[in-house]
Amino acid sequence: MGIRMDGIGMAWILDNENGFIWHNGGTGHYNSYLGFCRETGTAVAVLSNLSPNDRIPATVLGIKKLQELNR
């Protein structure tokens, strides 16, 4: 899926290979993702009113979009 977790700093997840810093969360029927690229300053936020178990989680959508924007 391309989701990397190389480390955690101040509760943010570090993806050293892609240069991304991200965090996600969810509760009940909601889930979210916030990530940005240190090098380009590009950021992506995904907010969803679906449970992470329904369809495609916000984390997968967010990481894919961040990768597309930083090719």
Image (spheres, helix red, strand yellow):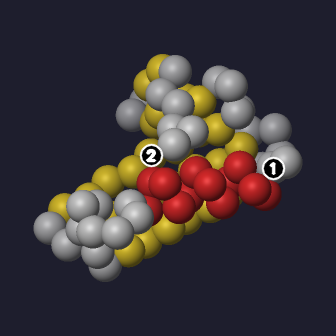
In the displayed structure, does residue 6 sit left or right of residue 29? Answer: right
Task: Give the number of the mark in front: 2 or 1.
Answer: 1
Where is residue 13? Give x, y as percent.
Answer: 47, 33
Q: Element under label 1?
A: loop
In the displayed structure, does residue 51 sit left or right of residue 17? Answer: left
Q: Element under label 2?
A: strand
Disc 2 or 1, which lies upstream in sequence? 2
In the displayed structure, does residue 47 sit left or right of residue 64? Answer: left
Q: Is residue 9 visible?
A: no
Relative to 34, does residue 37 appear above or below in the rendering? Answer: above
Where is residue 51? Give x, y as percent.
Answer: 24, 68
Separation of marks 2 and 1 at Cα, in angstroms: 18 Å
Where is residue 21? Give x, y as percent.
Answer: 58, 38
Disc number for residue 70? 1
Residue, far top: 7
For this rendering, which residue is in front, 42 or 57? 57
In the image, what residue type sits under mark 1?
Asn
For this rendering, which residue is in front, 46 or 54? 54
Relative to 29, does residue 12 appear above or below in the rendering? Answer: above
Q: Is residue 54 visible?
A: yes
Residue under numbered circle 2: 23
Measuring 48% from the left and 28% from the top, which residue is drawn there?
Answer: 5
> Dot 1 surroundings within 10 Å: few (below 14), some, or many (20 or more)?
some
Measuring 68% from the left and 25% from the top, which residue is drawn there?
Answer: 17
Mark count? 2
In the image, what residue type sits under mark 2?
His
Measuring 75% from the left and 56% from the top, which residue is drawn there?
Answer: 68
